[in-house]
Amino acid sequence: MNSTHNPLRLTLDGDALVANWRWLRARGGTAACGAAVKADGYGLGAIEVTRRLAEAGCRDVFVATWAEAEALLPTIGDASLSVLHGLAEGDLPLAAALPARPVLNTALQVARWRGIGAGRPCDVMVDTGMNRLGLSAREVGEGVLDGLDIDVLMSHLACADEDVPMNARQRSDFLAVAARVPARRISLANSAGICLGEDYAFDLTRPGLALYGGVPRREAEDGILQVVRVEAQILQRRRIGAGDSVGYNATFVAGREMELAILNIGYADGYLRGFSGTGRARAGDRMLPLVGRVSMDLVAVDAGGAPDLREGDWVELDYHLPAASAQSGLSQYELLTTLGSRHHRIWH
Ligand SMILES: *Cc1c(COP(=O)(O)O)cnc(C)c1O
């Protein structure tokens, strides 16, 4: 990291990350607990995340693309790496060269893998209702997978964050397919699926969101710790009078004299406009509500309750994921993956 002044930082709690992984592993009973680190570790940094989880004992890492796999290979030690998007024609050179497994999703991908795989194991996705990626039960019945060396046979839950009959239906459809496929391991649960109970864990779970502090269901509220903290520096303090407006389109008009602090963060940093009028910063235990619209690189907060804060001081944006999701209308996934490249990422 160079020494350029950076008025915007993410502090990332490595102990909380590992504690979340251990909590998820314990919820899965005897199942192994993997980690989904696609999209650069949901925005935290896939290499830093994977190194910590591999040291803690995580042995199954999932990425979306072969480029993500290539970037991670030096980090994973003896853990295994699976590529969720499978095997496009253009992936063949990397797939032939790298010791990662494709998650085969279509009959064409299976045929490609037979062409280059010779002896190496693969993973397979079967669709049980997500209708996104994966082979159908009918294709499996027709023998598309016959003779493949399959390590993990998996499916993906569509509504595991809700209590709906679809969860149990996907589970039983998955088991019906799995009974016909000689895979070494079977895997169904993402973070929310792990919360559904050990019945959903099978041999291997694949959490993403909850590793990073996301709370997909009530069951995780007390177990999952916040990993990401967003902090920005105060660029300016100012006093405004009754009738003065703040920010673009003057959406906020002060009803009284107020003290504002202008913070070095905005939607170009992933702090999106959904926080306008609802987001909060904090200085110690004092809340500083956002005032007016979020700009590209700036927001204003009401600093009346913190008269000691000055230019150059750091404040923390409220980024506890469930609360920030309610404030902004963004999903917890979006809150993580939109965090921009301008943040200085500091692991503790
Ligand atoms: C992203 C992903 C996961 C992780 O899901 P979370 O909801 O983030 O826990 C698991 N399995 C598959 C197939 C995925 O694409």
Image (tube, rainbow, N blue to C red):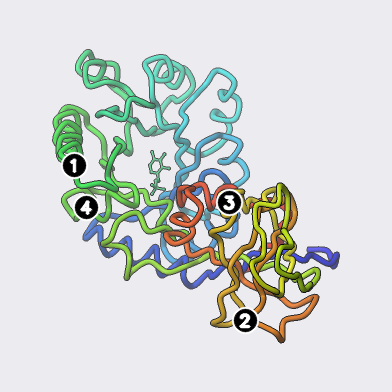
Q: State whether residue 63 is above or below residue 145.
A: below
The amino acid pointed to by label 4 is: Leu
Q: Quadrant of residue 92?
A: top right
Circle 2: is it few (<14), some (14-19), or many (20+) Cα within 10 Å? some
Disc 3 to disc 2: CB gap under 8 Å = no
The amino acid pointed to by label 1 is: Val
Closer to the eye: label 4 or 1: 1
**Visible in this render: residue 145?**
yes
Marks 3 and 4 sit apart, C-alpha to C-alpha, by 26 Å
Q: Which mark is residue 43?
A: 3
Closer to the eye: label 3 or 2: 2
Label 2: which residue?
305
Label 4: which residue?
196
Task: Identify the residue shown where x is 29% and y is 27%.
Answer: 127
The amino acid pointed to by label 3 is: Gly
Disc 3 to disc 4: CB gap under 8 Å = no
Label 1: which residue?
164
Closer to the eye: label 3 or 1: 1
Marks 4 and 1 sit apart, C-alpha to C-alpha, by 11 Å
Split into quadrants, the picture shows ligand 1 in the one at top left
